[in-house]
Image (tube, rainbow, N blue to C red):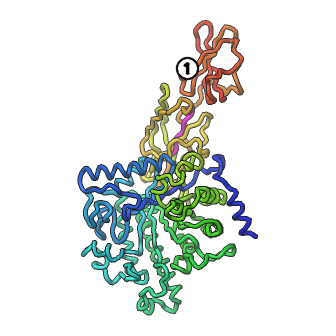
Amino acid sequence: MRVFITILIAGLLTCLPLSSQSKYEIRAAWLTTIGALDFPMQKANSPQGVIRQKRELCRILDKLKDARFNTVLLQTRLRGDVIYPSVFEGFAESLTGFTGRNPGYDLLKFAIAECHKRGMELHAWIVAIPIGNERQVKLQGKNAVTKKHPELCKKYKGIWYLDPGNPKTDDYLAGIVREIVSSYDIDGIHLDYIRYPEHPETFPDRALFRKYGKGKTVDQWRRDNITRIVRRLYDETKKLKPWIKVSSSPVGKYNDTPRYSSKGWNAFHTVYQDACQWMKEGIQDLIFPMMYFQRNSFYPFALDWNEHKSGRWVVPGLGIYFMHPDEQDWTLDEICRQISFTRENGMDGQAYFRTRFLLDNTKGLLDELKEQVYLHPAVVPPMTWEDSIPPSSPACPSFTAEGNVTRIEWKAPESKDNRDTCYYRIYASNSYPVDTDNIRNLQEARTDSTCYTFMPRMPWQQQLYWAVTAVDRFGNESLPLALNTPPKGTDIVEGGLPDIPQGCILIISDAAGQELVRMPSSARVWPKKLRDGLFRLSLLHPDGQVETIGITLR
């Protein structure tokens, strides 16, 4: 009965209203580079090709920002090859159309900078254990992992894998992680396929089991091998940059639950991922379980993940590719119910596989997100288990409003170790002080500059009061610095028009101070031509003096 009630409630949910949305919500998309499934269609085989490839990525990121996403999971290591210049592995075929060919620029460095410009995090997505099929390995030639480190590799059902049972596999993957973490300003390391292959009963690791099993069962030994690798990669990352988030994408069902059976397909037994133990041990900051299921195969297992996250974050991966008619032809309502369920049950966000199905607006999903679900930006929550001390507030506010242009400036807070402040968030409101906990007031999730210019597309989008906060690398946010304050004597005029003294003229202006209409003392009705919004009110006295009397919300 418990399962029935849970699923019935989920079926009745629609995407939650704006008032229910949290300021903190991870909104992620997997950007797949293998086979150019999501990117890049343009090949970097010339200076012009590099420009086209960069523009293609920028268009993708612009669309994600416009839909108010805040996290990009960029496939950085594919199948024994990478998208950046590496001492370990060669360039991926998808960059230029030729395996191993240098594209002439550093795609990872460029993508990080462009994500940060748009207020989004970039997590380097690493496919850990698979290293390619026969074709991929052959194209890599002497640079293939199978050639350079044959002792680490096992072939199983036509696919080559790093062997999790070999302790030297830890060293090899740790080297790749160190290379990325030390060289790039990434926000996260995201481990994919950190597991054994499907149906691994005959995986050729018996010799290593006899050597290292030490009285364990094969199942427990394999599970411990994967946990050992996860622990090593987590520790390597944190030694270098403790603020980088380390995550993984385990199989979407952890194990059978009292609510529902996993029907023989789960992370714990099938591919030896003990992901709940990883969170309990504190060797994952967040997980993106691949919950590409519907109905009873989604909701009970989402609850199970959330109930065993041990204070870390769980962001369900939603299989939006199944909405495509060539896949399983899921309805849009199915995804909307899943989003609502994750919010209703206090999960930490949503991730979408894959970006192309999202940006192609499959069955209207992108429109639904922009118009109903992600109406305002949200930010990634602070990683308080690593550091919970906020930086100091910015200083020396400067505010200038001319017409519909608002320009604000501030100075960075003092820092003893030069790491307190990483970037800033901008807030604005028509009430004072600006409430920085209200997502409606968030104007810019991330800016690295200490000045900001806002030019609203419509007059009623101009806000009266502005504030800025400093954010450190762990996501801790300072107290706000008010950039302007209400003029003395400014009051909120409730309701409609105020009384207009005899002989005076009421001047109604928009929020930016642009005059809209003048009304005589005999006026009693609000002008029909003015839409609802916030307006400034002034009195023009017979002697020509103009007196500001307040603002009104209509």
Residue lying farthest to the right in this orientation? 1
Q: Residue 131: in sight, yes or no? A: yes
Considering depth in this image, is 365 or 338 the residue closer to the camera?
365
Residue at image location 63% in from the left, 26% down from the top: 551
Judge left or right: residue 356 versus residue 519: left
Say which amino acid is labelled 1. Glu
Which image quarter: residue 162? bottom left
* Residue hosting label 1: 515
| Image height of 37 relative to 493, above or below | below
Residue at image location 56% in from the left, 78% down from the top: 268
Badge 1: residue crowd in 10 Å (few <14, some 14–19, many ≥20): some
| Image height of 175 relative to 26, above or below | below
Q: Residue 421: in sight, yes or no? A: no
Q: Quadrant of the C terminus?
A: top right
Residue at image location 49% in from the left, 63% down from the top: 326
The magenta stretch is 463-470
| Image height of 410 relative to 114, above or below | above
**Location of residue 220 in the rendering, given as x and y in whole percent from the top left corner:** 53, 85
Considering depth in this image, is 18 or 166 the residue closer to the camera?
18
Judge left or right: residue 275 versus residue 3: left
**Location of residue 505 in the rendering, given as x and y in whole percent from the top left corner:** 63, 12
Considering depth in this image, is 204 or 309 the residue closer to the camera?
204
Magenta region, mostly helix, strand or loop?
A: strand
Judge left or right: residue 190 versus residue 438: left
Q: Please check the rendered image and state whether residue 70 is part of the magenta-colored stretch, yes or no.
A: no
Q: Quadrant of the N terminus?
A: bottom right
Secondary structure of the residue carrying tag 1 is strand
Which image quarter: residue 176? bottom left
Which image quarter: residue 108? bottom left
**Location of residue 447 in the rendering, given as x and y in whole percent from the top left corner:** 45, 45
